[in-house]
Image (cartoon, grey):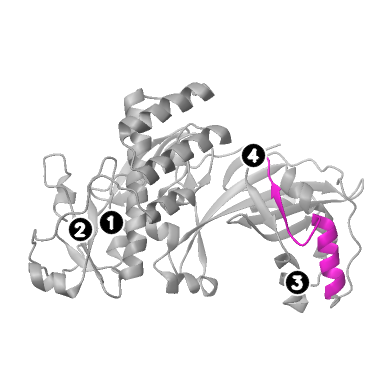
Amino acid sequence: MTIGEGLPAAPAAPVHFTEAIDYLRGKVRLPTRAWTDLWEGQHARGFVVAGAQTDALLADFHQAVTRATAEGRTLQQFREDFDRIVAAHGWSYNGSRGWRSRVIFQTNMRMAYAAGRWKQVQENKRTRPYLRYLAVKDSRTRPEHMALHGLVLPADDPFWERMYPPNGWNCRCTVQSLNARDLERYGYEVGTAPEIEEEARQINTPDGQVTVTVPKGVDPGFAYNPGQAAWGRGAQSVAMERHGGWDELVAPGAPSYSLDPLSATAPRAQLAPRVRQGDEVALRTLLRRSIGGDERIFADPSGAAVAVTQAVADHIVADSKRWDGRETYWPLIPELLTAPQEIWVGFARSTASGRVGLRRRYVRMVALDKDRAVALVADAEGGLWQAMTFFRGSARALGNIRKGLLIYRE
């Protein structure tokens, strides 16, 4: 491999552009105790500030970071927003002002830049199918990162799934997209991905130390591609998601919870009579009455919006096996979303695309009578209602349903 210096390096500091802004805007605000509550690709879906527990505080930081990206604001300008937000919310944080504001600013900006760059690479890889790793050649750069400088690989090489920069706190490495003409002009050669050497590292979590395995030279939590986690390996791979599986993602430092059985409460609405199988008109009429129209947006207690549409009825109409009586619980949709007993957030990675999905789960125990109860569980993704499941019997029957990141408890 010949390492040339002909092409101008990508900027070490993030710049504002549409894809980076979209990456930040697409994040869901999540309360966390520490940065280890989420891990690697989960951070591409959730906007977190370690120790920020209220949605109002997170919303202000989310807006400030997105504004900084959109307007190309400097760290000093962001610190003005940081001071204002801290004062307005009376937030007590760990570390110095300078360190904490810099970590929030630089980490979000660099990850947004990297993710946006990846999206551009995927959109243009037919004409620019190669990526070149670029390290800043000074004394501050890690030796392992310096050793990768100039490495040219196909944009779809699996190497970029775990070694796509930035690869650590304060890492300034970037990538550069190339076409065949660039290779010829500057004397670059497509190389072979080096073997990734793994090492065990200790990380501190609120619950104690945890051992994780990461590539040597990559800081714990950075061994992922933020753009791939947000958007997948490209439009074609995302289109294949429904044909592949999803692997559950659990952060090694995820909080553990003491879960008592949920108490069943009387429903606010009356259950509906079962609709005769095949009567689509009656089915859709029931849904309209249950939610108050053809579609409706509900606000949950955490501040998130969930849209319920006629797709709920479409799901049943599409398969005769789904006419199983689930529609009798539709009148309880509003209270399940607006007054759940718990809201959980779970993450999973598509085996087809590499995209990480974030799903909210709403849980409520409803007493049917003095001897019977049913657990209602609804899932929402991307602000859209996905499905509702019900479990009859003991409150303990929920089992593995109550898992993930608990973001709300009644």
Q: Closer to the N terminus: mark 1 or mark 4?
A: 1
- The answer for how far apart the CA atoms under marks 1 and 4 are is 35 Å
Count residues near mark 2 (Cα–Cα under 10 Å), then give few for <14, some for 14-19, many for 20+. Answer: many
- Please tell me whether mark 1 or mark 2 is closer to you in this view: 2
Residue 184 on the magenta segment: no
Residue type (three-letter) at the residue carrying disc 4: Tyr
Q: Which residue is mark 3?
A: 316
- The answer for how far apart the CA atoms under marks 2 and 3 are is 49 Å
- The answer for how far apart the CA atoms under marks 3 and 1 are is 43 Å
Residue type (three-letter) at the residue carrying disc 1: Met
- The answer for how far apart the CA atoms under marks 4 and 3 are is 30 Å
- Please tell me whether mark 4 or mark 2 is closer to you in this view: 2
Of the numbered discs in the image, which one, if any, rests on residue 163? Answer: 1
Quarter containing the C terminus? top right
The answer to the question of whether label 1 and label 2 lie on touching residues, with beta carbons closer than 8 A, is yes
Q: How many numbered marks does the figure carry?
A: 4
The answer to the question of whether label 1 and label 4 lie on touching residues, with beta carbons closer than 8 A, is no
Expressed as whole percent of the image width and height from the top left, the position of residue 128 reads: 25, 71
Q: Which residue is at the far front?
A: 71
Expressed as whole percent of the image width and height from the top left, the position of residue 133 reads: 20, 58
Residue beneath the point at 32% across and 46% down: 110
Count residues near mark 4 (Cα–Cα under 10 Å), then give few for <14, some for 14-19, many for 20+. Answer: some
Is 322 on the left-hand or right-hand side of 384? right
Q: Which residue is mark 4?
A: 408
> What stretch of residues is rendered in magenta?
280-301
Expressed as whole percent of the image width and height from the top left, the position of residue 52 reads: 50, 32
Is 303 on the left-hand or right-hand side of 394? left
Judging depth in this view, the residue of 271 and 312 nearest the camera is 312
